[in-house]
Image (spheres, rainbow, N blue to C red):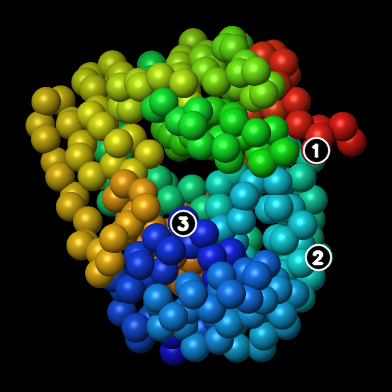
Amino acid sequence: MATRWGICSAGKISHDFVVALKTLSTEDHQVTAVAARELRQAQEFADKHGIPKVYGSYEELSIDPEIDVVYVGTIHPHHLRVGQLFMNAGKNVLIEKPLAMNAKEVKELVATAKKNKVFLMEALWTRFFPVSVEVRELLSHGDVGEVRMVRADLGAPLTHIPRLVEKELGGGALLDIGVYCLQFVLMVYRGERPESIQATGYKLDTGVDGHMVIVLKFSHNRMAVCTCSISMMLTNDAVIVGTKGMIKIPDHMWCPVTLEVNSKVIRHPLPEPCMPLNFTHSTGLRYEAADVRQCLLSGLKESSVMSLSESSLLAEIMDEARRQVGVTYSQDSNH
């Protein structure tokens, strides 16, 4: 029986997610309904994608009995409220990254999931790409020896996009794209908590971080450096340095299709989309969707690939980095 998806929010990322689902078998995945805050937007989205049911509120979607899991593609500040709405209605949820605005909100989401005994996952799609799977296998087999250093950079001039620069919309380089760099480091170091976190950067006039550099020190003097920016173009690559070699993701580190292992190039091409996409390599969203289905079929309440404990640690690291740079949101006031 197919996993029946409900789509929450009719924005750009939701469009790409539905297009990615269409690269998977309809026997495994079906989009049953879409909801937006305005019925007209939901109807236009449904017409474009051939979705049978349309709702003009998230509440209506939450009580649809024919939904197995809801994909939440709203802006960051709405993740907590909307995620809790669906989970309190007994729905499994896949919430776009970042899971919430801060560690406190992540804990609230996790608590809600456990209380209602539903599945919850942060949609950090990078984790599920074949390239990321191969990186984990290479590391587990010791192909590059003991890892000593990880570097991940991601940045582009994006300050013309209101969602990325306005505080009330959850803007800032770290929450929107720096999360990809940090999750990569945690993936390499297997979810280990760093011994120290040092962050520096600068804020835009709106008060959000325009550029941030984070240095993490792990046990046994293992290091990591993450750089993220919405004010300048960076290399957008990642490097893992081991005692016996090196692994590189030469470009698109947040949605990787190419890998270099000790100078050997390996490619994992993506399926072609059936309609234009809004973001680079978005058919790769199929891999996280496939993992959600397997988790649900197995009766799991979280994914082993992107666990809730790791999402919590990720949020804690981002909180501390923001504190050092002086970036605060209204959601932090309850700490």
Residue at left 70%, top 46%? 77
Observer-nearest of 283 and 219: 283
Camera-near label (3 vs 2) is 3
Q: In the rendered structure, find residue 331 and report the number of the disc placed on it.
A: 1
Q: Is the Cβ of the residue at disc 2 closer than 8 Å to that at disc 1?
A: no
Give left or right: position of 97 versus 262: right
Cα gap from disc 2 to disc 1, whole angstroms: 23 Å
SS state under label 2: helix
Label 2 sits on what residue type? Lys
Label 1 sits on what residue type? Gln
Residue at left 34%, top 83%? 26
Horizontal and vertical percent for residue 307? Answer: 57, 50
Q: Is the Cβ of the residue at disc 3 closer than 8 Å to that at disc 1?
A: no
Observer-nearest of 313 and 65: 65
Give left or right: position of 326 versus 220: right
230 lies above or below 71: above
Horizontal and vertical percent for residue 159? Answer: 50, 28
SS state under label 1: helix
